[in-house]
Image (spheres, rainbow, N blue to C red):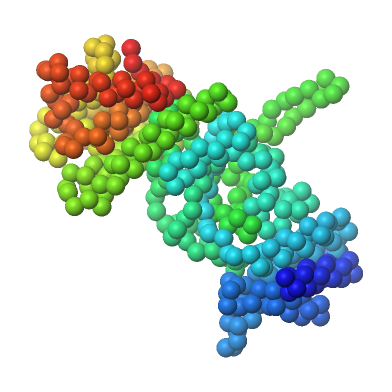
Amino acid sequence: MEATSQLRQAVLTWLEHARDLPSVPQTITDAALAARPEWEALSNAVVLAAPLPAHRDLYGKFTGDWLLRWPVVLGASGLGDATRLIAQGTAVPVEEVADSFVAFCTAPAPGVEDWLLLTGDLPAGTRIPLGRYTLQTFTADELARLSPMPALHSLQAGGLDLDLLAGAPFVHAPNLDRMPDRRGTHWFDFTGPRPETRHWRALLPLILWSNDLLHVDAVFNVERGRYFELNPNQVPTTIQTYPDRYGLPEEYEVRETGSFYLAPADLPRIQAFCSAVTAKIDAVMDGAISGRSLPKKRARRLERAARHLLQAYQRTHSDNGVWEQEADELHLDYVIALEALMASPNDKHEGISEKIRTRTAALFPSPRLRELVKSAVQKAYSTRSKYVHGDLLIDQEESKKLTELRELRLIVQQVVLRWLILTPCDTEDLAPRLDAAADCTSCKHAIDEPLRTFFQETPPRDDIQA
């Protein structure tokens, strides 16, 4: 406790000396600050309050000795920035800066977290568990506290405007594969596939809840109280005009939210839905470590279907709009997702498209819907086949093509949900049951009843039942 108090006093003394420094930032880099006489007193105080055995991440080995790393103590902590602001005459809350610096040096290193910034308009205070992930909205103050020096956010020119992100939906989870890093070097993470597919287990329940599109705008690493890497250029914005107090139009930059909207009254329903769907996803994915072949294949098939569905969602920029040159590729994604779930390990290649059509249709309750689904899947297979084999696609009115693509997207979304509802409770392959449902009333009832029960107890916001 005494060492912590001494460190706090050493920081205040350091900041007092900052008033006598030159006001040009280029002359007081972190390297230059570490060469000043005042650095010795500050670094000694850090060593006493945060000794090497418990805080190895603050130290580095130089010529055989472990020494404090000034890029961490001055750079990563934000103390160097605070020093330069004071030198330029900025009114810096030195007491808050000192407290933040002491916490940075003495607190245990936090775990690394993956954070996904999503499109969407959600109620303030939203917090929805999604397995190991959490969907959450934050205030600007809560976001500021993720950084090592919250008090500096509003003082630094060109920094991230946290008001843009206040209320934005974030999905976050611990990243158990990465270690905390206070060395000031945070490399872009090139590992793994696209972020929307890498984090599919969190995103899938959300896109199954609603027909509104949900996009990942940015992915970044967070070490709470240490590092918050979001670049302002990664936040999609738009300009909105509001009248000022004199009634004159004034432009404001706001975050672009897209179409995904959640009203406060929806919160209990989406929480129940996401909890139920997440449990079913977990039940299927537990099969990945099973000793049986079928559960392992199910887990792989679900992951493949989810990845392709989410990849197609990410490239669908509005409810009825995709880039024309990508429309046929999205057909590929949707057909792959359907085949991943509707095909059986025992299927022969011959007649597979017809089996996928009839099995997909069997997931829906009414004859009208079943015929609609069969027709949509047949068109998707035809488009997929022509595209893959290099045949010329028949010119089609763009609006009609986009309408059919949207219809296919909604069908695949429903197929994934219905497959999840039926599969975890089924000890055998689902495909033969769907085949039998076409000709057997009791078999059809065995498919419809679990679906009806789920949709009554934990309904999504958007569903096809009629």
From the top left corner, tell me how far across and down residue 421 is, in percent. 30, 30
The N terminus lies in quadrant? bottom right
Closest to the observer: 396 or 49?
49
From the top left corner, tell me how far across and down residue 312 is, in percent. 39, 35
Closest to the observer: 183 or 241?
183
The image shows residue 91, relative to residue 366, as above or below, that is: below
Looking at the rendered structure, the number of numbered marks drawn on it comes to: 0
Q: Is residue 97 left or right of residue 115?
A: right
- Answer with the quarter of the image where residue 342 lies: top left
Q: Is residue 74 left or right of residue 317?
A: right
The image shows residue 398, relative to residue 179, as above or below, that is: above
Residue visible at 16% across and 37% down in the picture: 428
From the top left corner, tell me how far across and down residue 222 is, in percent. 57, 54
Residue visible at 67% across and 34% down in the picture: 254
- Answer with the quarter of the image where residue 196 lies: top left
Asked whether residue 391 is in view, the answer is no
| Residue with the most extreme bottom position | 64
- Answer with the quarter of the image where residue 168 lies: top right
Residue visible at 60% across and 50% down in the picture: 230
Asked whether residue 430 is in view, the answer is yes
From the top left corner, tell me how far across and down residue 282 is, in percent. 34, 43
The C terminus lies in quadrant? top left
Closest to the observer: 466 or 235?
466
Residue visible at 55% across and 23% down in the picture: 265
